[in-house]
Image (cartoon, rainbow, N blue to C red):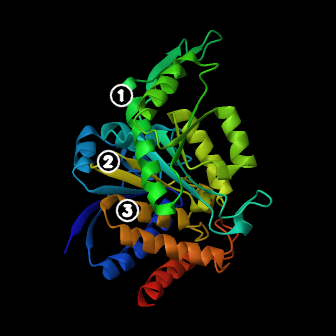
Amino acid sequence: MKTYDIGVIPGDGIGPEVIDEGLKVLRAVMKIEGFDCNIITYPHSGAHYLKTKELATDNLIDEWSNLDAVFLGAIGHPDVEVGLVERSVILGLRFGLDLYINLRPIKLYAKHMCPIKEKGPEDIDFVIVRENTEGLYSQIGGFLKQGTPDETSIVTGVYTRKGVERAVRYAFELAKERSKEKSTPPSVTMVDKANAIRSHDLWARTFAEVGEEYKDTEQDHAYVDACTMWMIKNPEWFDVIVTNNLFGDIITDLGAILQGGMGIAASGNIHPGKTSMFEPIHGSAPKYAGKNVACPLGAIMAAGMMLDFLGEKNGGKRIEDAVANLLSSGVIPSADARSGLSTTQVGNMVTEAVYKNAES
């Protein structure tokens, strides 16, 4: 029996609740597909920091690098300095393990969940590839004369040819894979702001040069402001979008709303062939913590993405199919805390659907 070492970081707020449901569904798939997961739980979170003052160390990052994958709930505590633990754990993983791809599927499963009039599942099915280790998130900068009237803040965005090229190349290869699955021509759109931020010309030139190797792929370009407009007006135009770290962070939230809200949105922080991390994209939502009302679908779908990455593609598809059927049928009416269903109810429903589909 194949066994995978999975590090689990439940985190803060609703994180532990949604992770529990993700693991519940994962265990069902394990039984059906005949593989095992060695679950190693780590306490690192804002709450853990308040108790111990411990942040993620280099030794811990090295330990995580020896796992097959990491499954993260959410980090963020109202009584801890904003971003302190997030930088330690999330950026520690992204930079420490060189997780250079942030992968965000944008897929609508039920028409009634989309806020755009006359758009349905046939119109919203694309993926955003966000470069994950450079740009304005490189943590280069600081403050001068902090706390005085002359305070100055400086941040430097960094783009390297290597960093840009590997993200662009990943997007082209992903488009080829999706083309085979969907029986449609591959298409990649590169999003930047090179007309106003001239350093983004590196993105434009790299995209054009790598694109010469993929002549059978439709290639398009959009400035980020235009991209947000087209995502609303004509989301069916997109197949694979590739963009820089900051823009990717922004447009993926817009994409989440197109597919029904943050409650169903999942992401992968990926280094192909190496340890990678998977998480729902919502925050810790402390106001909902402990109330058993948070939607766990994002965590459940992140578990499916993790299985797909590990090579357990049948398992990943079982999870997606179960969630899709429950949403399209209206059995789960929405992906938020107002669905009328508890966190555990939703997890149980997906688990039952996984077993039922396996029997049919």
Return the disc, 3 or 1, that comes first in the chain's sequence. 1
Residue carrying label 1: 162
Q: Give the position of the C terminus as an image quadrant.
A: bottom left
Q: Amino acid at mark 3?
A: Asp
Give percent across and percent down for residue 80.
51, 42
Q: Residues within 10 Å of mark 3 (few under 14, many from 20)?
A: some
Residue carrying label 3: 308
Labels 3 & 1 near each other (Cβ < 8 A): no
Q: Residues within 10 Å of mark 1 (few under 14, many from 20)?
A: few
| Residue 73 visible in the displayed image | no
Residue found at the very far right of the displayed protein? 117
Name the secondary structure under disc 2: loop
**Camera-nearest residue between 73 and 191:** 191
Residue found at the very far top of the displayed protein? 150
Name the secondary structure under disc 3: helix
Residue at left 27%, top 79%?
Answer: 34
Rounded to the nearest angstrom, the CA distance separating label 3 from label 2 is 12 Å
Residue carrying label 2: 272
Give percent across and percent down for residue 254.
66, 47
Return the disc, 3 or 2, that comes first in the chain's sequence. 2
Rendered position, 49 above or below 259: above
Residue at left 65%, top 79%?
Answer: 329
Return the disc, 2 or 1, that comes first in the chain's sequence. 1
- In this rendering, would 118 be left or right of 355? right
